[in-house]
Amino acid sequence: MNFTPKQHLELDNFIQYVDEILHKCDKGIEFCKICPNEFVCAELEKDDFGLENSTISEVLTAIQHALNKVPGYLNPEKRNDLREHIQQYINESPVHERGVWEDSILDLLLDGKLADPSYKPAAKIGETRVILTYNARISFSTHLNCLYLKSEHTRTHAAFHLPPENTANCARIVNQYIQAKHPEIPSRPTTGDIKYCLGKNMPEILRKCDLNETGLAAVLCSYSTLIRSPIPGNIAITGGLDMDGGSPPANHLDGKIGMVLRELHFIDTIIIPTGSSFSTRVPDYVQMVEVSGLEEAADAVFKSDFSI
């Protein structure tokens, strides 16, 4: 399938979507032939951005929609860049609309979510952010949740269940680790007791991802559920598990790290398998934590602090 700009919205690559709109608009704004008082971006008609039409008002509506969905903090450099860039197109909107756009879009960039460095998604038991790559070229993040069947009704039906072949050894690895580290915990789930769900139901896209690279996140979610300790919201994870419980090097790390740096400024820890290679320059505020399997990953995530 051909990847279209509007699909960045499906993948939660909201900043990428806004950047692509602004890049297209930079190539040419012209008067609308139908509405003489409205400008349009003819370049947007060349690709599928999911816009009803290419008037500046529609473009600004799409930008506002995407920014509303950004899940957390954006650093000052990016917010200032967006503010200056978007202001150019507000200045091209109908005069009677300009104040409305400034009070909506520009204020979004200063609100308590996007402008507050302490704002990040809440820590959750049995859930973490996992990084995947579609068709070896488009990286994105979604949530992975460990679901015990007895509580399945608590999840939405829109979730995508990972195929059993991608998680077949997760229960065994977690049980072995629990037995060794926390024998006082009585629960011993089997593979048939658990489902692992991705927060996005995008089967066409997810089936062209290497879902084996959810393995490390899956065992951490299962472990989190058993020890009843939440996984912090400032963490993102990628990497699989082999039959021995080790985590082989991850693929496409440059794209994955680039996505985090662009979209998820509240992420300050990326957990990757030991030996994974990347060339992207990682800023000081982001810590790359290499782990060889569940034990090192659990130490990094939970800091040996948990409650039963």
Image (cartoon, grey):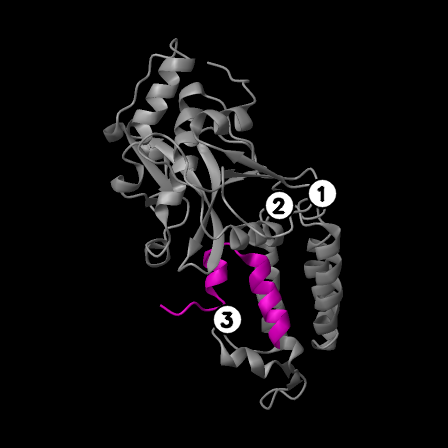
**Residue 27 against residue 231 in the figure, above or below:** below
Q: Mark 3 sits on what residue? A: 49
SS of the residue at dot 3? loop
Q: Mark 2 sits on what residue? A: 72
At label 1, the amino acid type is Asp
- Residue lying farthest to the top in this orientation: 184
In the image, 170 versus 199, the foreground residue is 170
Cα separation, mark 3 vs mark 1, equals: 29 Å
Residue at 41% over, 49% down: 200
> Hey, which quadrant is residue 101 in on the image?
bottom right
SS of the residue at dot 2? loop
The span picked out in magenta is: 1-24
Q: Mark 1 sits on what residue? A: 116
At label 2, the amino acid type is Gly
At label 3, the amino acid type is Phe
Disc 2 residue crowd, few under 14, some 14–19, many 20+, Cα 10 Å: many
